[in-house]
Image (cartoon, rainbow, N blue to C red):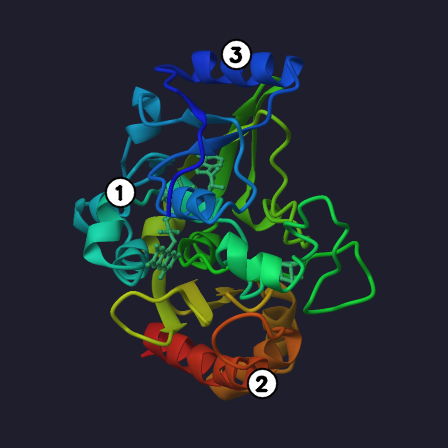
């Protein structure tokens, strides 16, 4: 597959990147951010919404910073698995992403901003043309969504990143920066249900870094992932759990690869704890009931949902035992 033509920009500071984005927007020129390129560049080769301009974040020194409490967007996943001081839960989750080769280029920011996925969408241009496109990449035809038809407004493509639920159960925040300035918000508030909009990033804004609170290092965590091939596949379902050992009120559970967004299950934890002692099976049933996978990834939604109970039980036992 040939790469479509685009102009590649290389800012070396955050200010330069933001200025560049603002100037392209002023000229009505569309662009994408690129980090490691392991997701966006294969999509470009498949002519999935390519843009005429691409801004690389690789030259921004600040974006490469890595410590126990601050992780820059350009930190490669291979550094997360190798660096001393990184929370063991993040090491465990990063080690389960893709293959060792991909983890050398793939970044934390790219993983958190990963495009949502769907088997009607992650296909070559010829394949998609043969079925007359779909709403998310309709090529100007106004094509409908093939998973939930007759609505033409919402895309229910699945978010299949592994890091997000793990950062969520560690109470992580994200620092976003763009032409309107800088803001920080909990990662649990970063994602948006529409598989086309995906997250709260505004035009010209990018995710600069992830911050962890000081008590994150005291949390014990566990991540359970369902995938087709252990060697490198995206999650078909993923459950992360963490707590401050001995204190059930600090328990956090989050899921990924089951809906358009990864999300925390605070409501289910609260309802469960209000009923009495922490019981992995009881809580696993509540989490399972709360997720609604649709038919757009490799494994059937019924199976993925049934596995949520198993994964949640395993994750909870992993932190309680
Ligand atoms: C064979 C294969 C297997 C894979 N398996 C897994 C897996 O098991 N689990 C998993 O989670 N992922 C998997 N991936 C997806 C991908 O490799 C990773 O999610 C990776 O971390 C993406 O990071 P990147 O730097 O390459 O992102 P890029 O491809 O550079 O970018 C991804 C998206 O994020 C945007 N973006 C990047 N950085 C920023 C930023 N700082 N701010 C705003 N937007 C940004 C880009 O515009 C693009 O839309 C797999 C990919 C392949 C090819
Ligand atoms: S969920 Fe629907 S609109 Fe979204 S990518 Fe899949 S088929 Fe297209």
Question: At which x and y percent is residue 241?
Answer: 43, 67
Residue at the image position 49 percent from the left and 59 percent from the top: 123
- Cα–Cα span, label 1 and label 2: 34 Å
- The quadrant of the picture occupied by the C terminus is bottom left
Q: Is residue 117 visible?
A: no
Mark 3, ligand 1, within 8 Å: the answer is no
Question: At which x and y percent is residue 150?
Answer: 82, 66
Disc 1 is placed on an element classified as: helix
Question: At which x and y percent is residue 208?
Answer: 44, 30
Mark 1, ligand 1, within 8 Å: the answer is yes
Foreground residue, 10 or 48? 48
Give the vertical position of 227 relative to 256 (above or below).
below
Label ID, residue 302:
2
**Which picture quadrant has residue 233?**
bottom left
- Residue at the spot of label 3: 19
- Residue at the spot of label 1: 105
**Contact (CB < 8 A) between labels 3 and 2?**
no
- Cα–Cα span, label 3 and label 1: 26 Å
Give the vertical position of 70 relative to 221 (above or below).
above
Ranked by sequence position, the earlier of labels 1 and 2 is: 1
């Amino acid at each position: 597959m040939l790469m479509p033509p685009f102009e590649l920009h290389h800012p070396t500071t955050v200010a330069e990147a933001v200025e560049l984005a603002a100037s392209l927007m002023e000229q009505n020129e569309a662009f994408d951010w690129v980090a490691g390129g392991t997701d966006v560049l294969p999509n470009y080769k498949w002519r999935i919404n390519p843009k005429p301009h691409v801004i690389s974040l690789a030259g921004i020194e600040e974006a490469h910073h890595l410590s126990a409490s601050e992780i820059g967007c350009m930190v490669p996943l291979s550094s997360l698995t190798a660096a001393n001081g990184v929370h063991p839960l993040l090491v465990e989750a990063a080690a389960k992403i893709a293959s060792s080769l991909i983890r050398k280029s793939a970044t934390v920011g790219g993983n958190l901003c990963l495009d949502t996925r769907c088997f009607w969408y992650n296909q070559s241009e010829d394949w998609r043309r043969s079925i007359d496109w779909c709403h998310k990449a309709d090529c100007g035809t106004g094509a409908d969504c093939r998973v939930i038809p007759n609505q033409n407004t919402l895309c229910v493509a699945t978010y299949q990143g592994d890091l997000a639920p793990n950062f969520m159960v560690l109470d992580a925040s994200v620092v976003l920066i763009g032409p309107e300035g800088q803001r920080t918000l909990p990662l649990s508030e970063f994602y948006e249900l529409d598989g086309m909009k995906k997250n709260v990033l505004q035009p010209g804004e990018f995710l600069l870094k992830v911050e962890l609170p000081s008590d994150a290092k005291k949390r014990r965590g566990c991540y359970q992932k369902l995938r087709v091939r252990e060697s490198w596949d995206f999650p078909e379902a993923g459950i992360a759990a963490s707590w401050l050992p001995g204190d059930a009120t600090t328990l956090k559970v989050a899921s990924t690869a089951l809906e358009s967004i990864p999300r925390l299950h605070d409501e289910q934890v609260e309802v469960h704890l209000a009923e009495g002692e922490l019981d992995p099976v009881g809580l696993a049933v509540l989490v399972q009931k709360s997720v609604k996978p649709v038919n757009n990834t490799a494994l059937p939604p019924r199976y993925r949902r049934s596995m949520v109970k198993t994964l949640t039980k395993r994750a909870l036992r992993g932190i309680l035992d």
